């Protein structure tokens, strides 16, 4: 199925009567949907089958039905939380022989996608620092938590009861810190499992990428026609019954039917295709039997009453004449016969040595023989899943001009200059080529979101365009309108695949003279998204 939802958690408020709850996120098995009821008495974990059941819809998502009595009933003021608990296991078993089942492969993709979404939900609930904060580390964050606990203990010295409460809070904080460490360790382990699973799936796809195309003719050693095949018996097949086969045989989508070749009792011969051995033949045409010419020669009379043989010819004496031309001579009448069996094995037909088989043509893709799989697309999807767990995803760099504004003349596209040099405004330090332009050099292969901003003021109303270039080639054009003496901002933005060492720059073009604003109004950002 197609997974378009990125949500793996549903939250509902009960009223004491509702028992049906919709589930928008997709799931493969009903028991993978977990449920818990939260209220003033704490959390109440529901047991699947006893307290609730789930039902899936064909296109994804479904519903959960809670039991009307305790503990399944969600009372007024209580909250029901439904979330996906997809097991991190690999259940798909791809063999390195036979055909590749597209349904099985898609189900494996669905499992990996749900794992990645579930992992993202879990990571999102961890203690994190903002993307723009490059100074705070997770260990420093934990040290800060510990320091706050210490200050809380000192403040609790004012009263005995507050000191006891502060001590308990410190214990809980230390437990939370330990739990955070364990959660981070688990996240790293899950990431490695996802990467390994994707790598294994890539190998399985490459090893099992075999299928029989429509129109292929195969011989079978028994008189049983496999699913998806038809015997080549000269019969007419219709487009209604076998659309792909008729399209292949007729070379288009117009003909209503096609005739199969009748290969019963026939030997197949490779088409000449310009070699000159069997010239003039059309692919699919029949050819009658033939043998090489048999020749021989004999004298037209027999001397001395003796029989003669030459090749397949033979003469035998029929009657004798004694001394027809005088003493010492003898002649005879003879019978001339031709018998090829004197030279080669004979039968009622011409044939080579052979084994009888059943010739069949692939007519349709049966459920047991999977439909064709686009390997490039399958491997791209596996690479995309692996990229979700890549440690480089989310890293970015924003460069800004250090100095003042820049005047863009009324001309063609002008490369935005780094007036006074450029500096990292946020994120990583992906320095450009230092050629005076506002630029970023891509550090590694991947998909990047590129965004530029240019704020300027025009002396008259007119158009203003912003461009993004990669290695000098234009890849994006953003158009806007600049009002007289009003600040106008152009924001060209795109997402594309880039290679290590690619250089991105921003250009600007205007129909009226335009001057950029001060420091920080011209920026260029590249963010790794895959």
Image (spheres, helix red, strand yellow):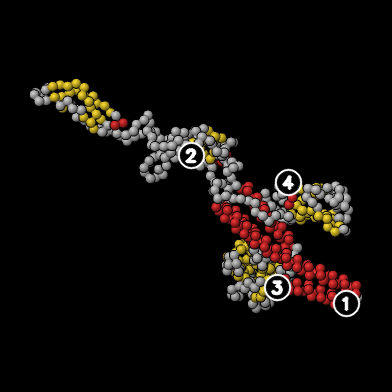
Mark sitting earlier along the chain (4/3)? 4
Say the numbered circle drawn on residue 138: none
Coordinates of residue 484 in the picture (x, y in percent): 72, 69
Which is nearer the N-term, disc 4 or disc 2? 4
Looking at marks 2 and 1 on the same chain, the residue that comes earlier in the sequence is marked by 1
Q: Of tags 1 and 3, which is closer to the observer?
A: 1
Judge by depth and name the residue closer to the eye, 310 or 410: 310
Whether the residues at callouts 4 and 2 have beta carbons within 8 Å, the answer is: no
Residue 55 lies, with reference to residue 236, above or below; the image says: below
Can you identify the residue that label 1 sits on? Answer: 157
Residue picked out by circle 4: 57
Q: How much space separates mark 4 and mark 2, taking CA atoms? A: 43 Å
Structural distance between the alpha carbons of marks 2 and 1: 91 Å
Label 4 element class: loop
Question: Where 167 falls versus 37 (above or below)?
Answer: below
Residue beneath disc 2: 219
Q: Which residue is mark 3?
A: 134
Horizontal arrangement in the rendering, residue 69 relative to residue 143 (left or right): right
Q: How far apart are the two marked residues, 4 and 3, measured between alpha carbons?
A: 44 Å
Instruction: Measure how far apart labels 1 and 3 are at the Cα level.
Output: 36 Å
Q: Earlier in the sequence, mark 2 or mark 3?
A: 3
Across and down, in percent, residue 433 comes to 59, 73
Spot occupied by residue 327 in the image (x, y as percentages of width and height)? 8, 24
Q: Quadrant of residue 126?
A: bottom right
Which corner quadrant holds the C terminus? bottom right
Q: Which numbered mark, 2 or 3, is in the foreground of this view?
A: 2
Which sits earlier in the primary sequence, circle 4 or circle 1?
4
């Amino acid at each position: 199925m197609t997974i378009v939802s990125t949500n793996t958690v549903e939250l509902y408020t009960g009223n004491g009567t509702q028992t049906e709850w919709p589930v928008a996120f997709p799931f493969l098995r009903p028991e993978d949907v977990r449920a818990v009821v939260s209220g003033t008495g704490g959390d109440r974990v529901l047991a699947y089958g006893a307290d609730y059941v789930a039902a899936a819809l064909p296109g994804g998502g479904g519903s959960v039905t809670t039991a009307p009595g305790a503990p399944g009933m969600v009372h007024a003021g209580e909250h029901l939380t439904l979330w996906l608990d997809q097991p991190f296991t690999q259940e798909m078993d791809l063999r390195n022989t036979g055909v590749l089942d597209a349904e099985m492969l898609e189900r494996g993709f669905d499992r990996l996608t749900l794992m990645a979404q579930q992992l993202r939900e879990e990571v999102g609930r961890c203690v994190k620092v903002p993307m723009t904060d490059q100074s705070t580390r997770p260990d420093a964050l934990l040290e800060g938590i510990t320091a706050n606990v210490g200050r809380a203990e000192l403040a609790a010295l004012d009263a005995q009861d507050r000191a006891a409460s502060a001590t308990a809070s410190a214990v809980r904080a230390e437990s939370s810190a330990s739990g955070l460490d364990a959660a981070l360790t688990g996240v790293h382990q899950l990431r490695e499992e996802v990467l390994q699973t994707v790598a294994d799936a890539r190998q399985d796809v490459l090893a099992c990428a075999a299928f029989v195309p429509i129109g292929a003719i195969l011989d079978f050693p028994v008189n049983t026609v496999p699913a998806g095949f038809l015997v080549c018996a000269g019969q007419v097949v219709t487009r209604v019954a076998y659309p792909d086969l008729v399209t292949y045989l007729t070379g288009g989508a117009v003909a209503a039917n096609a005739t199969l070749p009748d290969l019963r009792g026939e030997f197949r011969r490779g088409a000449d295709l310009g070699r000159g051995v069997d010239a003039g033949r059309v692919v699919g045409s029949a050819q009658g039997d033939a043998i090489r010419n048999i020749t021989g020669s004999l004298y037209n009379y027999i001397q001395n009453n003796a029989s003669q043989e030459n090749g397949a010819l033979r003469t035998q004496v029929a009657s004798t004449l004694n001394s027809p031309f005088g003493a010492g001579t003898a002649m005879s009448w003879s019978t001339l016969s031709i018998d090829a069996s004197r030279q080669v094995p004979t039968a009622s037909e011409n044939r080579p040595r052979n084994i009888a088989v059943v010739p069949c043509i692939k007519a349709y893709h049966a459920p047991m023989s999977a439909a064709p799989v686009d390997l490039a697309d399958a491997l791209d999807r596996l690479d995309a899943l692996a990229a979700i767990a890549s440690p480089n995803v989310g890293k970015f760099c924003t460069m800004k001009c250090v100095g003042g504004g820049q005047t863009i003349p009324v001309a063609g596209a002008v490369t935005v200059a780094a007036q006074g040099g450029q500096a990292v405004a946020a994120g990583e330090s992906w320095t450009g080529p230092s050629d005076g332009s506002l630029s970023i050099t891509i550090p590694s292969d991947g998909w990047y979101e590129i965004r530029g901003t240019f704020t300027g003021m025009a002396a008259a109303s007119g158009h203003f365009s912003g461009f993004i270039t990669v290695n000098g080639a234009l890849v994006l054009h953003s158009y806007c309108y600049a009002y007289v003496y009003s600040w106008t901002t152009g924001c060209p933005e795109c997402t594309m695949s880039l290679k290590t060492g690619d250089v991105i720059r921003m250009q600007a073009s205007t129909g009226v003279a335009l001057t950029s604003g001060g420091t920080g109004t011209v920026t260029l950002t590249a963010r790794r998204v895959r």
